[in-house]
Amino acid sequence: MSFLVLQAYLKLIYFDLYLARGNFAALYNKVRMYPLTKNTPSPGAVEQICAAVDMACIWYWKEALCLQRSAALACLLKRYGVPAQMVIGAQQMPFKAHAWVEVHGRVVNDKAYMPELYGVLDRC
């Protein structure tokens, strides 16, 4: 589990660099184009990887925002053979945007009602 937390921590740093430069398009493309490995995910892989990202966020030196956290999680899940999608949603009044990860249409790193609360803008 500790190696998985280290991988998650490094992904948080990686995507933090994109956010620091304001390069949202590059972050989006990196997640969208991240290859899904052919490995069959182990039972409980989604829960283990989500827990590793949560732990990495606890140890991260600053608050990991939803876009950074979701990008890191989606890429790690894909690395371990889980067909994950990062979803970006927004509500108009008052304007708020949010990002989360879904696997087979099920929210895995947030509340299940996120798609209803925020209109889905895009899935990558």
Image (cartoon, rainbow, N blue to C red):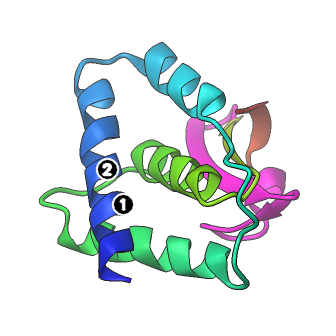
Q: Assess whether residue 103 is covered by the magenta stretch.
A: yes
Q: Residue at 32% across / 73% down in the picture?
A: 3
* Dot 1 alpha-carbon crowd within 10 angstroms: few under 14, some 14 to 19, many 20 or more: many
Left or right of residue 83: residue 104: right
Is residue 13 among the parts visible in the rendering? Answer: yes
Give the amino acid type for the residue marked by disc 1 in the picture. Answer: Ala
Residue at far front of view: 39
* Quadrant containing the N terminus in the rendered view: bottom left
The residues colored magenta run 91-117
- Residue 47 on image: x %, y %: 61, 80
Give the amino acid type for the residue marked by disc 2 in the picture. Answer: Leu
In this figure, which residue is indicated by the disc labeled 2? 12
Figure quadrant of residue 16:
top left
* Quadrant containing the C terminus in the rendered view: top right
Report the Cα–Cα distance between label 1 and label 2.
Answer: 6 Å
Query: Compared with residue 105, is residue 75 higher up or lower down, i.e. above or below?
Result: above
- Residue 122 on image: x %, y %: 75, 29
The answer to whether mark 1 and mark 2 are in CB contact below 8 A is: yes
Q: Residue at 25% across / 57% down in the picture?
A: 63
Q: Specify the label residue 8 is tagged with.
A: 1
- Residue 109 on image: x %, y %: 60, 67
